[in-house]
Amino acid sequence: MTQIRVVRIHNELLGTYGDQGNAEVLAFRAKFHGITANIIDVSYSDPLPRNGNIYLLGGAEDSAQLLSLEALRRERALEDAIDDGAVLLAICAGFQIVGNSFWANGREVEGLGILDVASVPGKKRCVGEVKTKCSILNLELSGFENHSGVTKLSSGVQRFASVSTGFGNGDKKTDGALSGNVFGTYMHGPILARNPELADLLLTRATGRQFSKIEDPLATKYAHIAARY
Ligand code: GLN
């Protein structure tokens, strides 16, 4: 596969903390690997294409999060694409949306049920730098979090990463969840700019291809600076 479609969902609603940049990092890394990644921006009012290879959901404050959920619920396009093997990276509000339920604007709402997790309001807002260890990558990741919801994984659901600094899912131990090609996390950054190896993993999952390691001194330098916080 030399061409992939990266679907950036509801950029106008889910763009908090720069998560839209994840699409650009994927396209940039894909180019290194000889793959052309076309970024498809899908607005709240547009139908979601079912033929994407990687789907991106970003963070949002509560009202925008609810609008995005409403639009995703109009069709089962995201669920269908995932069933067909597409990759999903869902950050913070996006992670909560794809769970079974979450709270927004003081009320509990049903999520899409793609990940078997549930979010509830935490005692205090979780804000700050996050460091985690991601077992599938065997890699330290760094990010930034800012959320009031905390998330509980149903038994048997795999965490995305273990937390060494920060709150993650709210227990200060686990961050996010992982099921097949669906990755949920609280880490903004954007996460793929801070941790480009994760972008490569998503590209591998989407294309079935293994890539040689990219020497990118600037990305490595940035990752080291970010990891100091
Ligand atoms: N509105 C959600 C919360 O506060 C998600 C916030 C975000 O995406 N940064 O928990």
Image (cartoon, rainbow, N blue to C red):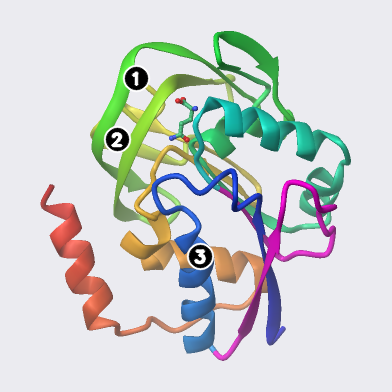
In screen coordinates, is 221 left or right of 66? left
Tag 1: amino acid: Asp
Figure check: 13 above or below 126: below
Question: To which residue does mark 1 refer?
Answer: 171
Front residue of this view, candidates 153 and 21: 21
Q: Quadrant of the N terminus?
A: bottom right
Report the Cα–Cα distance between label 2 and label 3: 20 Å
Front residue of this view, candidates 106 and 92: 106
Quadrant of residue 118 within the rendered picture: top right
Q: Residue at x 44, y 84 (%)?
A: 212
Q: Residue at x 85, y 48 (%)?
A: 77
* Secondary structure under the numbered disc 2 in the rendered image: strand
Question: To which residue does mark 3 refer?
Answer: 201
Return the x and y of residue 150 as percentages of the image width and height: 44, 20
Report the Cα–Cα distance between label 1 and label 2: 9 Å
Tag 3: amino acid: Leu
Q: Residue at x 46, y 53 (%)?
A: 19
Magenta residues (range):
34-57
Q: Are marks 2 and 3 in contact (CB under 8 Å)?
A: no
Tag 2: amino acid: Val
Figure check: 174 above or below 196: above
